[in-house]
Image (cartoon, rainbow, N blue to C red):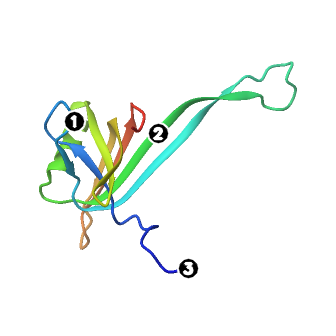
Amino acid sequence: MACTNQYSGTGIVLKVNVSDSAGTDMKTVGGQTGLTRSSSADFIDLSNKDTGAVVCGVPGRINKTLTMDALAPVSDDGRDAIQDAHDNRTAVSIAVFKSAVLQESATAYVMSFDQNDPDNDKSTYTVNLQLITAWA
């Protein structure tokens, strides 16, 4: 099998709406170094005295999150929009693109925004987003 770029995450980037209420003014968040999309389901425990020693239950709500790591630029419209959404506790429109082609979009809350400014090394930040709509 020939070595191809189809498995590389290099071309996959997060974009964020920076200005309009329709969510169409999407800008790439600059300096991205990592993007992780996670999905998990709650477990509703229905165990009782009649079910015995084995846990009995059903899946509950789906929880989708996104974590992005990036170099910390001095100024970047995408980064600024994410930080503003976090500071103002407002939802933000986000989209994932692969090689400039829209893969999926959603609305999310910025749950954390952590910046690391070490001595004698690059400044980075990590953003954790909680989706409040399904990926579309």
- Residue farthest along the bottom direction in this orientation: 2
Mark 3 Cα shell of 10 Å, populated few (<14), some (14-19), many (≥20): few
Q: Marks 3 and 1, Cα distance to the nearest angstrom?
A: 41 Å
Under mark 3, the amino acid is: Met
Of residues 114 and 119, the one drawn nearer to the viewer in this rendering: 114
Q: Position of residue 33 (x, y in %)?
A: 33, 63
Q: Quadrant of the N terminus?
A: bottom right
Please give left or right for residue 6 compared with residue 70 in the image: right
Please tell me whether mark 3 or mark 1 is closer to you in this view: 3
Please give left or right for residue 111 compared with residue 43 in the image: left
- Residue drawn where x is 25% and y is 30% of the image: 90
Marks 3/2 in contact by CB < 8 Å: the verdict is: no
Q: Secondary structure at mark 1?
A: loop
Q: Is residue 44 above or below residue 116?
A: above
Under mark 1, the amino acid is: Gly
Q: Quadrant of residue 43?
A: top right
Q: Which residue is mark 2?
A: 64
Of residues 127 and 22, the one drawn nearer to the viewer in this rendering: 22
Q: Which residue is mark 1?
A: 23
Mark 1 Cα shell of 10 Å, populated few (<14), some (14-19), many (≥20): some
Q: Which residue is mark 3?
A: 1
Q: Position of residue 11 (x, y in %)?
A: 33, 63
Under mark 2, the amino acid is: Lys
Marks 3/1 in contact by CB < 8 Å: the verdict is: no
Q: Position of residue 60 (x, y in %)?
A: 60, 28
Mark closest to the chain's N terminus, 2 or 1: 1
Q: Position of residue 72 (x, y in %)?
A: 22, 59
Mark closest to the chain's N terminus, 3 or 2: 3
Q: Marks 3 and 2, Cα distance to the nearest angstrom?
A: 34 Å
Q: Secondary structure at mark 3?
A: loop
